[in-house]
């Protein structure tokens, strides 16, 4: 299928989401400087064409997507181009694509301040607890990711003590909840042993419970992050969260 910026926006207009994304190019993080420079210029041209083609700006918010891989001057150029087009919100794309967490935070450190404070700043493709907290600390307002639901379908849950692979044999007779600090429907009503049994017998209810739990866990985490921001205590929250979270250090790497 051939997609142009106009066609991509027409599809988004027809689908009717409240928030839409510009049609952009997301180059690999370690692509060459020259390539990324051309790519950023292309993404800016496409953003302008998409904005022009957008039919419902009154009730569908179209976000521009800042690209530029790990190059500070290209991120600056991209942000400058898009901010001059006055989008109602801005996404940061091209991160969480295989670079290290330190690399991602380095790029966020210089990219987020380039975007207006009075508009939502959205970090695309991030959904692990540590990256959510690190992003919020750097001024990110919104995130999205398949991670919580994808790992849930594979029998892995996020807990206040780190990652837990509930399908593992060691939980066969574990009659405690997925997370003893969680108040979700799955944790209030079912045991690890039962959920493990459901997953091993290919009973879809097992995946529904782990998915429900992971989404609840992340929504609860972000609620705590918002409260900590309001109390000017996000660094303290980060420290105490990870003290608990790092408990399961063997699995903390991806969280
Ligand atoms: Zn739960």
Image (spheres, grey):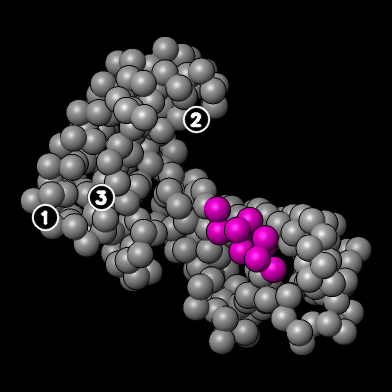
Reply above or below: 233 against 92: below
- Seen as rendered, the residue at the extreme top is 55
Q: Which numbered disc covers residue 33?
A: 1
Q: Earlier in the sequence, mark 2 or mark 3?
A: 2
Q: Which residue is found at the position 71% from the left and 57% from the top? A: 211
What residue did someone put label 2 on? 19
* Circles 1, 3 touching at the beta carbon (< 8 Å): no
* Of marks 1 and 2, the one in the foreground: 1
Q: CA distance from mark 1 to mark 3?
A: 11 Å
Q: Which residue is found at the position 30% from the left and 25% from the top? A: 4
* Circles 1, 2 touching at the beta carbon (< 8 Å): no
> How many residues crowd around disc 2 within 10 Å: few (fewer than 14), some, or many (20 or more)?
few
| Residue 242 point in image, percent of width and height | 56, 76
What residue did someone put label 3 on? 27
Viewer-nearest residue: 55 or 108: 55
| Residue 93 point in image, percent of width and height | 34, 47
| Residue 55 point in image, percent of width and height | 42, 12
């Amino acid at each position: 299928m051939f997609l142009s910026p106009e066609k991509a926006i027409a599809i988004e207009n027809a689908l009717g989401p409240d928030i839409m994304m510009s049609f952009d190019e997301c180059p690999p993080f370690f692509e060459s400087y020259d390539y990324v420079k051309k790519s950023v210029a292309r993404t800016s041209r496409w953003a302008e064409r998409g904005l022009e083609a957008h039919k419902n700006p009154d009730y569908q918010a179209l976000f521009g997507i800042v690209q530029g891989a790990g190059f500070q001057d290209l991120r600056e150029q991209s942000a400058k181009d898009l901010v001059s087009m006055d989008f109602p919100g801005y996404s940061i794309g091209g991160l969480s694509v295989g670079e290290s967490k330190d690399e991602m935070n380095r790029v966020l450190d210089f990219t987020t301040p380039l975007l207006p404070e009075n508009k939502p700043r959205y970090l695309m493709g991030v959904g692990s607890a540590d990256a959510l907290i690190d992003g919020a600390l750097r001024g990110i307002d919104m995130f999205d990711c398949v991670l919580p639901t994808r790992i849930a379908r594979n029998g892995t849950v996020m807990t206040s003590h780190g990652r837990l692979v509930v399908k593992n044999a060691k939980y066969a007779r574990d009659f405690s909840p997925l997370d003893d600090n969680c108040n979700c429907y799955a944790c209030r009503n079912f045991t690890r042993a039962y959920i493990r049994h459901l997953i091993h017998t290919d009973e879809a209810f097992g995946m529904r419970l782990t998915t429900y739990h992971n989404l609840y866990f992340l929504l609860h985490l972000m609620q705590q992050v918002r409260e900590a921001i309001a109390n000017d205590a996000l660094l303290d929250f980060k420290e105490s969260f990870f003290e608990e979270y790092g408990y399961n250090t063997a699995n903390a790497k991806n969280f």
